[in-house]
Amino acid sequence: WNSLERLPSNNQYNDEATYVYGGFLNFLQRVFVDKVSENQIELNTIVKRVSIHEEEQYVDIEVIKSNQQQVTYQAKHVICTQYVGCLKQSMHQTFIPPLLHAKRMYIQKLVFSTINK
């Protein structure tokens, strides 16, 4: 897909805009360019389980890589760009403990559209 994202300007007059071509991944790379190194981004990876440790403020992410290797990562922050349909279908098995009822309801109300990503 050849999509376009418009990022807000950082100046007080909002007279400039940044356009990012190439879709959502390119958008994330632009936003986090100075915060996340490329070797910390996993592509073509299936998220099997996200275990949330609230008191310790980290998550364990169990993934299945494209070569079928299973790996567990620890992180303070995670961005998952899963399709809405997959998220709706798998959220009950993916998140431990389960997401709050309100979050599950919001996910169920999302429609299938790239604009809602």
Image (cartoon, grey):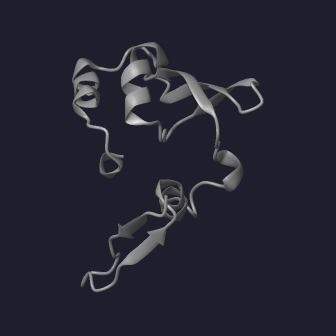
117, above or below 21, in the image: above
Q: In which quarter of the image is residue 60?
A: top right
52, above or below 75, in the image: above
**What's the residue at 40%, 14% (across, down)?**
92
Out of 22 and 11, give the one closest to the viewer.
Answer: 22
Out of 21 and 77, give the one closest to the viewer.
Answer: 21
Q: Please indicate whether residue 77 sits to the left or right of residue 41 in the image.
A: left
Q: How many numbered marks appear?
A: 0
Q: Please indicate whether residue 53 sits to the left or right of residue 10 in the image.
A: right
Q: Please indicate whether residue 51 sits to the left or right of residue 42 in the image.
A: left
Task: From the top left corner, tell me how far across and down residue 97 is, in percent.
Answer: 42, 14
- The single residue placed furthest to the front in the displayed view is 1
Q: Quadrant of residue 19?
A: bottom left
Task: From the top left corner, tell me how far across and down residue 18 is, in percent.
Answer: 41, 76
Out of 101 and 21, give the one closest to the viewer.
Answer: 21
**What's the residue at 35%, 75% (across, down)?**
10
Task: From the top left corner, tell me how far across and down residue 94 is, in percent.
Answer: 48, 19
Out of 23 and 49, give the one closest to the viewer.
Answer: 23
Task: From the top left corner, tell me how far across and down residue 1 is, in percent.
Answer: 49, 58
**What's the residue at 72%, 33% (across, down)?**
66
**What's the residue at 49%, 69% (across, down)?**
21
